Amino acid sequence: MSGGVDSSVAAALLCRQGVDVVGVWMRLHDVADSYSESRRSCCSADAADDARRVAGQLGIPFHILNLEAAFGRGVLEPFLHAYQAGETPSPCVDCNSTVKFGALLGQARHLYGCAAVATGHYARVAVSVDAATGRTRYRLLAARDPDKDQSYFLYGLGQDQLAHTRFPLGELTKPEVRGLAHELGLATADKPESQEICFVPGGDYRTALRDRAGWTPLPGPLVDVDGRTVGRHQGTAAYTVGQRQGLGVALGEPRFVARIDAAANLVQLGRRADLQRRAFAVRDAAFVDGKPPHPSGFTADVRIRHRAALVPGRIRRREASDPAAPALWDVEVEEPVWAPAPGQAAVFYAAGEVLGGGRIAPAGA
């Protein structure tokens, strides 16, 4: 229970179904110590109070669980490393895989004796049984509400995790959830949604880099696609692929960050057309079923950022000379996608089902 309306309604729906529910709020980092943080943060101290109030209204036990160590290892450290390596992280993917449906799920099953973890995510889990083998298969599906669907951030969940996961809001729209919260008189019924990264107060990740990683900006060249120096950047970690604002140059037409080379301390700019891609590579692939649809390759709809349009594509496993080397998957899409950013998630779908996904690799990988 994050203290928001979604997880509050999820808990209420389970109680309505007669499920034995335990409310848990996760302490993930030190932002939770400050009441000065915006109430839009799911991890501020007042969010814990809101979660506790809703648990009291529902008549369920409530606990605060400290998962700072797991969050630091699995989310915060990769986040800081990615920006310093010239990539754009996706911390919600890491948080779901390693914390909510990793450390929290483990604690729920073994510490509290719970059968499953339920959250306020907008996604669905479907269960099927293979008639030939008798194997139970858990399928991750997009939510019924396409505007709220969060399946993109859940591609890292495997069969055991989905077997012990519940998404009570998967068949509901956001207005329906708000309506239920008002109908039930929940304390969070009118609470606004959290819009920023929970451990980055004010939404400026550069502050987190300075405060948590000791990052000091090292200026370097801003170059165009021809290699011509057109300005100076303020440290590669301060930029992301696709960024337009804050470049500090005026070249007569819009320019966007096209490539970041942290090792060379270089940021390359391009026109919008220069950032169109029909092919890119994916590393650290994970598949919901435990294996890809086919070992060497498959077709799927590809999404390269949350809310981006799905684009049909072909995903092929790259042959590697070193069998011990991390696997790379080459993605070719039928229509160009704009600014696939290294470090961001590319997720593969088939008819609304999440097959898996991975992280976009740097150009030339």
Image (cartoon, rainbow, N blue to C red):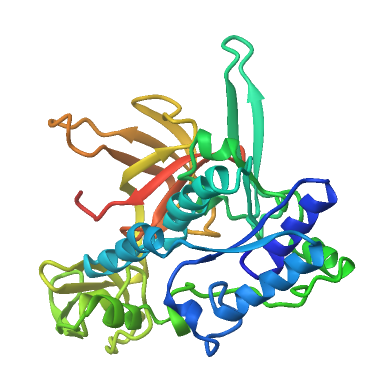
User: Residue 24 in the image: x percent, y percent?
Assistant: 61, 60
The N terminus sits in image quarter: bottom right
Please state if 250 lies on the left or on the right of 104 as rendered.
left
Residue 339 seen in render: no
Residue drawn at x 61%, y 75% as measured from the top left: 47
User: Residue 334 in the image: x percent, y percent?
Assistant: 44, 43
Residue drawn at x 28%, y 89% as measured from the top left: 248
Please state if 286 lies on the left or on the right of 327 as rendered.
right
User: Residue 236 in the image: x percent, y percent?
Assistant: 22, 75
* 46 is higher (above) or lower (below) than 133: below
Quadrant in the rendering for residue 235: bottom left
Residue drawn at x 74%, y 74% as measured from the top left: 188
Quadrant in the rendering for residue 229: bottom left
* 199 is higher (above) or lower (below) than 109: below
Q: Residue furthest right?
A: 183
Please state if 310 lies on the left or on the right of 256 as rendered.
right
* 97 is higher (above) or lower (below) than 159: below
Residue drawn at x 24%, y 67% as measured from the top left: 86
Q: Residue furthest top?
A: 132
Q: How many marks?
A: 0
User: Residue 148 in the image: x percent, y percent?
Assistant: 65, 60
Residue 131 seen in render: yes
* Along the viewing direction, whichever of 56 and 75 lies nearer the viewer: 56
* Along the viewing direction, whichever of 94 and 59 lies nearer the viewer: 59
* Along the viewing direction, whichever of 342 and 91 lies nearer the viewer: 91
* 349 is higher (above) or lower (below) than 258: above
